Amino acid sequence: MQNHQRKTYVTQLHKVYNEMSQALLQYQNDKNALNLKEAGLTSNHSIDSFITQYFKVVQTCDSITGCFASSYKSMNGTAYGAMTTSLKSYVLSNGAAIRPNYSEEGDKLINLMVDINGQKGPNLHGRDLFFMFIYNNGMIDDRGSREPMSEDEREKSYQSKCITPSNVGGCFGKILNDNWEMTY
């Protein structure tokens, strides 16, 4: 893959990250809350309301069908199916598709599946499909027991999840570790 294409993917991912970060902060401020749970993000229903209120949504889907590609592959070329498909999904005005899932584990509240270019290819986990995890304090990181994850934790997650076709996460943390560059 050419370096230009990698930079394009990372630029699109960074845009989604920034828009989500700003929306989460605005949501907390609007609710005069100290964290996301206090602000009311406590279920998939409340997340759906948050998305429609704080983002310019151009398409809403009852599942990932219609908003995301019909199939994805891992970077090693095998079919990638490690994702919940039955939840409400959205296409944003920037062309990205997102599928939030309220899944509280410790301080982690939301698993956010992101396809930075919607149904367009290459439809590969780690290239245009990423998983971000939103924590109660509004921080967005990779999947961990706490935030922020250390560089070592992110690297281990990358090794065990991003390059393994049966798990989610790891790729986003690797990009964070590498200062918003796709080095893999």
Image (cartoon, rainbow, N blue to C red):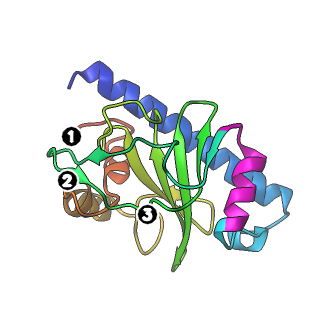
**In this figure, which residue is indicated by the disc labeled 3?**
84
Please state the horizontal and vertical placement of residue 159, each as a whole percent of the image: 19, 58
Q: Nearer the viewer, residue 92 or 68?
A: 68
Residue type for callout 3: Thr
Proximity of marks 1 and 2: CB atoms separated by less than 8 Å = yes
Residue 121 vertical placement versus 41 (above, below): above
Which quadrant of the rendered structure holds the N terminus?
top left
User: Hey, which quadrant is residue 134 in on the image?
Assistant: bottom right
Question: What residue appears at the point 67 percent right and 45 percent down from the top-left corner?
Answer: 22
Find numbered disc 3 in the image and state the secondary structure of the residue it sits on. loop
Proximity of marks 3 and 1: CB atoms separated by less than 8 Å = no
Residue 125 seen in the current view = no
Q: Residue furthest bottom?
A: 106
In whole angstroms, how far apart are the C-alphas of marks 1 and 2? 10 Å
Decide which of tag 2 and tag 3 comes sooner along the chain: 3
**In this figure, which residue is indicated by the disc labeled 1?**
184
Residue type for callout 1: Tyr
Residue 19 vertical placement versus 28 (above, below): above
Question: What residue appears at the point 54 percent right and 47 percent down from the top-left corner?
Answer: 98
Which quadrant of the rendered structure holds the C terminus?
top left
Magenta range: 45-58
Please state the horizontal and vertical placement of residue 92, each as a whole percent of the image: 62, 37
Decide which of tag 3 and tag 1 comes sooner along the chain: 3
